[in-house]
Amino acid sequence: MEPIAPDLFTLDGGEPALLGGRDRATGRIVFPLPADRDRFEPVALPREGRIWSWTVQRFRPKSPPYTGPEDFTPYAIAYVELPGAVIVEARLTGFDHGQLKVGLPCRLVVEPFAGKASYAFAPLESAHV
Amino acid sequence: MSDVCIIGAGIHPFGRTDGMTGLQQGVFAARQALEDSGVEWSEVEIAYGGSSAAGNADIMVNDLGLTGVPFINVANGCATGGSALFGAFSAIKAGQAEIALAVGFDKHPRGAFDPKPADWGLPDWYGETGLMLTTQFFALKLRRYMEQFGISARTLGLVAEKAFENGALAPHSWRKQPVDLDTILNSQMVNDPLTKFMFCSPAEGAVALVLASERKARELGAKAVKLKTATVRTRPPGSFEVFSPGLDIERGPSPTVIASRAAFQAAGIGPEDVDVAQLQDTESGAEIMHMAENGFCADGEQEQWLAEGRTKIGGRLPVNTDGGCLACGEPIGASGLRQVYENVVQLQGRAGARQVEGAKVGYSHVYGAPGLSAVTVLER
C-alpha cells in the first residue's frame, strides 16, 4: 500500500519507525523530517513511547483537508513522547476511549487510512518502555 | 518618545449579522470610534487593520474617504487585532503620527475553522488524517496542564458559567443567556475534556480604536485612556503551539509568558496592580492556563480562584468582563481589539451592569497561531 507521504515513516528493518530530522548543528530532533537535508539528518525515531496528552475527536473535520470516511466515528489522538527524541502527534488505534490517560505506553503501527498507509499508536501490552 | 492614548472606541456587535459583510462591520466600528473620539477621518494620519476571512482592511477608504492616509493591512492569526494596535501604537510612539486608527473585523462561516496545511508550512497528510484542528490543540494542551497541576472539569465549567453570566450584561456580546454549570458540564463532549459550552464559535464582529499622542489628546480635550504598552512576542523554543506535529521534549515557556513579562516591564507595573483583565478564552481551559501564563496566579491556583469566584465581576481580579470569546464568539481579526475596547469602557466607568468598580488598570491578552501573543496595559 502506498504511504500517505514519502519520508513519513520507514519499514526498513521489519518494524515501522517514524522518520524525524536531527539538526546537524544542535542535535535537536524534530518531526516530521524537514526537506532541508543540509541542516537535518534523517533519523528513525523510537517505536515505543508514552501518551503525553490525549483527546478524542468527536466531530468530523471539514473536507478538505480531511480525507477520512464520510461515515464518521470518533477517534482518539495523542501526543506521544518518544523517549530521548521528540513528542509526536498521532492518531491512536485500539485504545478504549474511556481508559485513556497520560502515561499509557504505546507502540507505532502502520495501518490503512483512506486507501493509503498511515501511522498510529496502539496499546503496548507489556509496559517495558 | 510620546506617550500614547486611546481617545475613541467603536464596536459592531459580535455574533451573526446577515446582510452585512465583515468589511461593512469594520466601517461601522471605525465610524463609531471616530465619533467617540471627536476627530474626523481626515485627521487620521495612519491606519492599521486586518481580518482573517473578510477581506483587506484598506478597502475601507472607499467608505471612510480617500484622504490619502497610509493604511497597512495586518494578518496575524488570532492576534491580528492586537498586531494592528501594536502598529498604531508604535507609529505614535515613534512620532510618525499624532492620530492613528486600529481596526479589526471578521466574518466566518459556521463550524470549526478549516485551515489548509500548506498555508502553515505543514505537509498535506497532517490535514488529511484529521490532526489539524484548533479544537484538538486546545484540548491537548489543556489535558496535559490539568494532569500536571490538578485542574478539574468543574473548574472548566465555572469559567464558562462566568462567561455567559457576563455576556448577558454586555450589549456587544453574542450569547445573551446565562447557562448553568450542570448544563455546561453535561453538554455534548467535543474534544475531551471540553464540552460544547466550553468552546467559543467562529463568528462576526468588528472593533476600531482611535489613538493619539498624549499631547494631541490633551489639545483635543479628549476623554483619554493611556495605552501604557502594546507588546507582541512570537514563540520561544520549546513552546506548545497550535498545529504542531512534533514538540520538543525539553519544554519552554509560551509566547504569552514572554509577552506578558515584557508588557509589565514596559508599563512599570506588576500583575497585582491590574484591576480588570481580558484573557484569551477560545475555550475555558485557555482562560485557566492564561491566568498563570500572564502572571496573575501560580499554576494550579486557578482551582481555588474559580471556586472562590475571584475572577467574577466583584471578585479580586475580574476576568473577561464582557464574556470573552465564549460569549462574544471569535471573529479572528476583531477579538484582540474587543478586549481592549472592553477595557476602555471599564476604565471610563461606562460598563453599566458589568462595571468593575474603580477600575484604573486594564490588561488584555490575545494568543494567535502559529505562536504569538499580544498584550496591552491600559491606565486611566
Image (tube, rainbow, N blue to C red):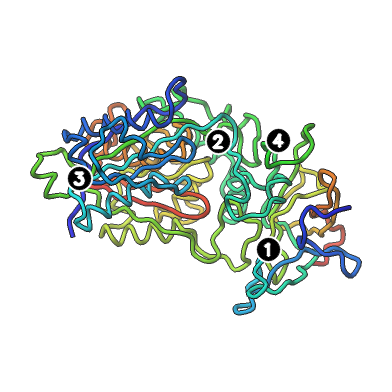
Query: Which amino acid type corresponds to the residue marked 2 in the rendered image?
Result: Met
Residue B380: give x, y in percent of width and height: 20, 45
Give the tally of numbered discs.
4
User: Label 4 lies in what chain?
Assistant: A
Instruction: Give the Cα separation between the discs numbered 4 and 1.
Output: 25 Å
Distance from the alpha carbon under mark 3 to that under mark 1:
47 Å
Location of the N terminus of chain B by quadrant is: bottom left
Q: Chain of mark 3?
A: B
> Does residue B289 sit above or below A15 in this rendering?
above
Instruction: Kindly report the distance in space between the C-alpha atoms of the residues bearing marks 3 and 2.
Output: 39 Å
Task: Check disc 4 and report the residue beneath it.
Answer: A60
The chain to which mark 2 is attached is B
Is residue B137 visible in this depiction of the protein? Answer: yes
Chain of the residue under the numbered disc 1 shown in the image: A
The residue drawn where x is 46% and y is 22% is: B177
Point out the frontmost of discs 3 and 2: 3
Disc sitting over residue B99 in the figure:
3
Residue hosting label 2: B198
Residue at image point 30% right, 40% down: B343
Instruction: Name the mark nearer the viewer: 1 or 2.
Output: 1
| Residue that badge 1 annotates | A31
Question: Going by the image, does A56 lie left or right of B312?
Answer: right
Sequence-first disc among 3 and 2: 3
Q: Label 3 sits on what residue type?
A: Ile
